[in-house]
Amino acid sequence: MKKHTVHFRQLILVPLIVILLCSTGSSISYPPNDPQPINDDKIPQILSLIDEHLILEYLQQIVGLGPRKTGTYGCEKAGEYIFQQFQNSGLLARYQNWTAWKKKPFPIRFTSKNIEGTLPGTDPADTSVLIFNAHYDSVAQGPGANDDGSGTAGVMAAAYALSHFTFKKTVKFVTFSGEENGLLGSQAYTKEAYARNENILVEINADMIGHDEGTNTMTVTTTEDVGWVWDIFQSINANYSIGLTVNRGNITRQRNDLGGSDYSAFLPYSWEAVCCWEGSHDPNFHTPQDDLSNINLSYLVNMTRLIAASLAYLADLDTTPPQVRITSPRVGYLYFDGMQRHPLKDFKTTVINNIWIWAEMDNETVPIERAEFYFDGKLVYTDTEAPFKWEFNKISLRKHEITVVVYDQLGRTSSDWREIRFINLLRKIQ
């Protein structure tokens, strides 16, 4: 699936203190001293641990097991290898078993595993989680060296390097199967994480990061509230002379059709995503030519170094910008008279009669001054005291867009967007 479906402008390097605003209506602005200066003494050590020997060892093993079509023995063996390497790195490794149906072009049932390795955080007061993921399955036509053996090797190498240190926040390294069949594995993973109210600060996706034809560039795309993570990538790249040119792009959450790559499975649940893409188009992906000869090893090493170092920096941050999420009604449920009834498919949310729309903060470090509720783009209510909520009390027989924007005392903003079907024929008299 994927890959580069939009075109991005090339941006010049800027100092860390210069914060670029997202082009969407829900951007974040920062005071001059935020984010924190990069002076982490772990980063040079992490960079030194990730070299061509390490990356090649992982990649040769993964590619040697290809093709890794989901459900085949090759895919199963690749999952076992990743699981063992996570254990060897001292991570808390687990399988997440999943089963799903792909409906088109004809119904077919897939059964497979996601592999997760967890590096627990040391700060018990910090419940936020960082995720670095890739997909380890491939198409049936080829060994999948770049798509996505490169991202999988990057996740494994980052896990190995970061496992030598401790961090305040929990970091999870995840490899998905089922990506090439419609993001089946990542959908199962995010559904489970949402059910247990996982506090995901940022998800970083690496899909095809090993092919380069001399551009030495990468593109980092972000959802609306984590444009500041691009600045971290940019600054680490410059401060530690990694040598890449880091371009920037935006991920649109509204009406996302679960295309592109596994990051899309995180978007309906209001989590923030960052995607790392190679700079050159790869003409060999999804073909038998996507083998080891298709990989620029030194480029893959630098891409992995930059992602791993940025992840390490994020894992020790004391303060982060605000993140608001619409927490009720929940994604994927039917509600009647404000009460949750039963689950629905495909991330749909349906509300019958009136309901209160709740917006809550994740990882709040600065007090929130107000929350604005928008109905189909029109401001309908401003709440200045937590808990932030607004009662939907309108006649409707269709889908509507609900947007919440919060403002903290530093002037920073965060937003969340949800499409909900409202069925309400009797407007309650206030």
Image: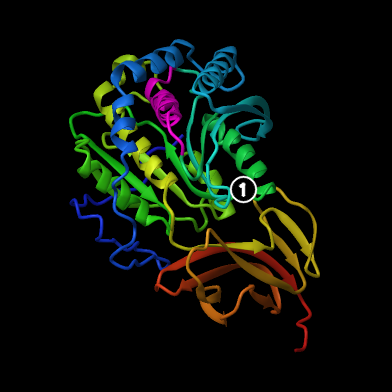
Which amino acid type is shown beneath numbered disc 1? Glu
Which residue is located at x 32 percent, y 68 percent? 31
Is 10 placed left or right of 169 in the picture?
left
Can I make out residue 195 in this image? yes
In this rendering, the answer to whether 351 lies above or below 296 is below
Name the outermost residue toward the top: 64
The location of residue 126, given as percent across then percent down, is: 54, 51
Left/right placement of residue 50 relative to residue 274 reads: left
Q: Residue at x 18, y 30 (%)?
A: 214
The magenta segment: 142-166
Residue 140 in the magenta stretch? The answer is no
In this rendered view, identify the residue nearer to me: 291 or 136: 136
- For the residue pair 180 and 130, the one nearer the viewer reads as 130
The image quarter containing residue 80 is: top right
Q: Quadrant of the C terminus?
A: bottom right
Q: Position of residue 19 (x, y in %)?
A: 28, 61
* Residue 296 can be seen, yes or no: no
Residue located 52% across and 80% down the image: 379
Give the dominant element type of the magenta stretch: helix, strand or loop.
helix
Provide the residue designation for mark 1.
198
In the figure, 4 relative to 300: above or below?
A: below
